[in-house]
Amino acid sequence: MIKRVHFPSSPLPYLLVAPQIAITIVFFIWPAGQAMYQSFLIEDAFGFGREFVWFENFEILFEDPLYADVFIRTIFFSVMVAALSMFLSLILAGFADRVVKGATIYRTLLIWPYAVAPVLAGALWVFMFNPSVGIIAYWLDLIGVDWNHFLNGGQAMALIVFAASWKQIAYNFLFYLAAMQAIPKSMIEAAAIDGAGPAKRFWTIIFPLVSPTTFFLLVINIVYAFFDTFGIIHAVTEGGPAGSTVTLVYKVYSDGFIGLDLGGSAAQSVILMAMVIGLTVIQFRYVERRVDY
Amino acid sequence: MVENRPFFDTLTHIILILGVILIAFPIWITFVAATHDLARMSQAPIPIWPGSHFFDNLKLALEGKVVSGVDMLPVWKMMFNSLIMALMIAIGKIIISILSAYAIVYFDFPFRMGFFWMIFITLMLPVEVRILPTFEVVASLGMLNSYLGLTVPLIASATATFMFRQVFLTIPDEMLESARIDGAGPVRFFFDMLLPLSRTNIAALFVILFIYGWNQYMWPLLITTDSSLSTVVVSIKEMLDSAERTPEWNTIMMTALLAMLPPILVIVSMQKLFVKGLTETDK
Amino acid sequence: MKLSRKALLAATIIAGLTAPAMAATEIQWWHAMGGVNGELVNEMAEKFNASQSDYKVVPVYKGGYADTMTAAIAAFRAKEQPAIVQVFEVGTATMMAAKGAIYPISQLMKDTGEEFDQSAYLPAVVSYYQSPEGDLLSMPFNSSTPVMWYNKDALDKAGANVPTTWDEVEEAAQKLVDSGMDCGYSFGWQSWVMMENYSAWHNMPSGTKENGFAGFDTEFTFNNDAVINRLQKIADDGKKGLFKYGGRTGESRPLFVNGECGLWMNSSAYYGGFVKDIKFNFGQTMLPLDTDVADKPQNSIIGGATLWVLQGHESEEYKGVAKFLKFISTPEIQAKWHQTTGYVPITTAAYELSKEQGYYKENPGTDTAIKQLSLNTPTPNSRGIRYGNMVQVRDVVNEEMEALWAGKKDAKTAMDDAVKRGNALLRKFERSAK
């Protein structure tokens, strides 16, 4: 889309886009092209022996039932993170919206986790849940829950969902609160005069009115869980136990960076890139007006 | 509110306070761990109330003695590296994206859409996914072990460009018309009109990008071999990798606490602009 | 001839200008040693640097073993590699296959004219890193072997003896749990301890072609009855609360240190940290014997890491590298390294020196690792392993064992699956390595 009114063509716009285009070509398109080429090779780590194998790396992936598991698990993880963090922040924002004095204080206290590095956030959660020294593991033990995320895949998954949601609550909360504060107070008051209680007002007026925000946050949260939780998983479980916390992005890293299977890892990168581009185009078509962060 | 429900108002505060406790608990634990000595931190269960060793631990961290026996950079030097990295990423990305968004929205020129899509496809793909080929590119450009190598590859992303584009599209056309009647050229229009109008958005982006830059892990780990360039987040992960010993939680958590401060300060002090800048494009 | 003042001046200036060029040649050494071990690494480099002025060794900590190896490989591809890199034992096949990247130690010593006697090194240590022709490929640095750590106080309290066989381990575990302990035994690095070493200890192969030493076309065979039966028994112990799984590498260490589990099988190199952290009486003893499988133990195999020299540097630098590698093999350096860390000494001389110093008398049990390694002359089954893609194979074994401990699979299914998946990785490596 371009402005109806605009400046005529001149060398200036080329100068303006040049820095970004240069950086994009050198640090994005070039490496992405390399990754694509790499995905057709089976190569030793040092790059001495290489064999061009066409789509074999992709075939290996698609024939591997474990890769399909990773796909499903990634979707499950993303949905859980989005649901948990959005639900909690919706509730908190709903209450904070009622507070006339002190809403800013609550907001200030609730946005901290957004600033914490994923790797650090992961380390903190491991620290609290460490089966032998962690304080929460200790409390759980007192009430008869045997916490061991090194062994129990379900617990490990729960732990990365907690850690990832914890980081994202702040962001969701800010958006929900802003959206709720933008609702005209007269609407709420009218409903209150009609006798609708706070809970009813929340579900019949506020919740529907913030649904565009909900939709927007859903997209953001899923993208976040898909792509930006690498640091958390790396710090919390390293993908274990028994691979039960390996997500698509984590697998690219562990196969390529740790396992040194460059071709297989590159093939996964290419699949992810295709997915991202596809998603972006869809999003661009249907939710054009929303920016994602 | 028109009604008077004291019980419900109390409940509201109780729930919010519970929420704050839940959210702040991990950070509280970090603080508590930073106030005890090593002996206490290696006993189970770890404490939940502060101890008396805050300043001892602070001193160790500031002197670079976080892990006993390993000479590390003093924490303030690591934080300085993180700061440079975060600022270069935030400022660099804001500058290049506002320029390219301006070109794409306000100029008609051949290949405009081509450029747009080229930038656009870089949206969302994290650096971890293309990390090894990107490393090779950076190495072949001789940019390993430099601030440029640390930051420039992370600037290659479309998110900020995309946001400025949205902002510019919501600015009424009359602005440009009247500016042109006044005889303003593209450069003056940019500085006099667009820049002031996108102030809050720039602030919001700055918050996001500063935090993004400050919190980078994989990339700085891979491309720096010169320990004088290590950033604080990478170093904390190193301190935790203590294969055959107990991690020294007291000093590590002190470092973590210090590492959290700058990004928390940025978001807390800029929270109003942050929300406004992000939600306004979203009208 | 008399020099004029001017000429003298000029000579001085030139000397001054060229001085930086004559400064010590810098040698980068990337390593994965944190904590106390990192301190010793720095100390070794400092001592070497102080002992001469031609070379300066610069140790750089690059994260864990896997991070360090990947960083070095990525750097090699970008022609920015260090001269020396520490690589863990499972990376051996990958490094060895990269003939153009590595500078074998025997060759290095020959080319730089340094005297080098391979027989001075402990056979159990060097055999893991030799080429088929018997040349030493990389310099053993930090070598350990799994031992059984025990909580003496807890065993006494439970009225149990230090176990020597697996039956006794289970018996002692039962007593420990009965006496109120949280669990009887645990272990870490499970592929290394329970598969690779379990096989070697009972003189069984874990793969064909002499555990991969005789060719890349090796196949895994560790899904045999002995391994399956033992693992199944451990999984059953887990259900009874006798065994507790605590993570893939060292994450279960606190279980032992905090007195939750009385027996813990893992690397002898935990010694240094244990001395500092543990309040109770503890000791180390040899790995238990599975009497269903063998009458007597063979020998255990090493783990840890070696120093590889990478190609692509000036010959001047390699001279320094050779001198440095010899320097860190001297008995004094090695004895200190061995005694402080719990890694085994790499030379016979360092072992003898430690004996002379009375170290083993004062610290009973600290020679367990070395005795265990040199219990018998290594056979093709107990010399070591050399499988490609071993880092990934270990992950596969970890995953399958975790599925077993969690009760999702039985031991036979888990090991069959591990072998199947592991073989696929071996075939992939074979193709890339050619």
Image (spheres, coloured by chain):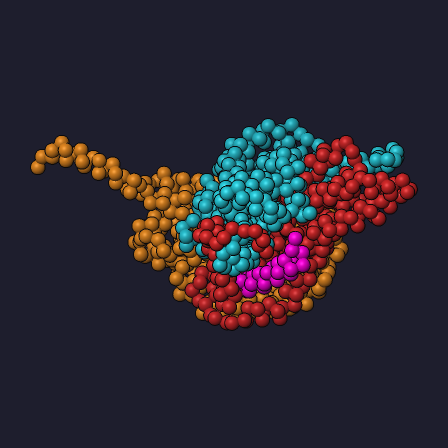
**Which residue shows up at 72% across the image and 53% down it?**
A215
- Between residue C234 and residue A265, name the one nearer to us: A265
Asked whether the viewer can see residue C178, the reply is no
Chain appearing in cyan on the rendered image: B
* Residue C229 as seen in the image, left or right of residue C22: right
Asked whether the viewer can see residue B74, the reply is yes
**Which residue shows up at 44% across the image and 52% down it?**
A11
**Which residue shows up at 50% across the image and 46% down it?**
B186
- Between residue B257 and residue B206, name the one nearer to us: B206
Q: What stretch is highlighted in magenta?
A: A265-289
Dividing the picture into quadrants, the one containing residue A258 is: bottom right
Dividing the picture into quadrants, the one containing residue C423 is: bottom right
Percent position (x, y) of residue A175? 70, 44
Dividing the picture into quadrants, the one containing residue A69 is: bottom right
* Residue B252 as seen in the image, left or right of residue C321: right
Percent position (x, y) of residue A55? 54, 71
Q: From the viewer's perspective, is residue A71 above or below residue B44? A: below
Percent position (x, y) of residue C289? 62, 58
Q: From the viewer's perspective, is residue B12 above or below residue A226? A: above
Chain appearing in orange on the rendered image: C
Percent position (x, y) of residue C316? 31, 50
Does the magenta-highlighted stretch encompass residue A208? no
Does the magenta-highlighted stretch encompass residue A285? yes
Image hue for chain A: red
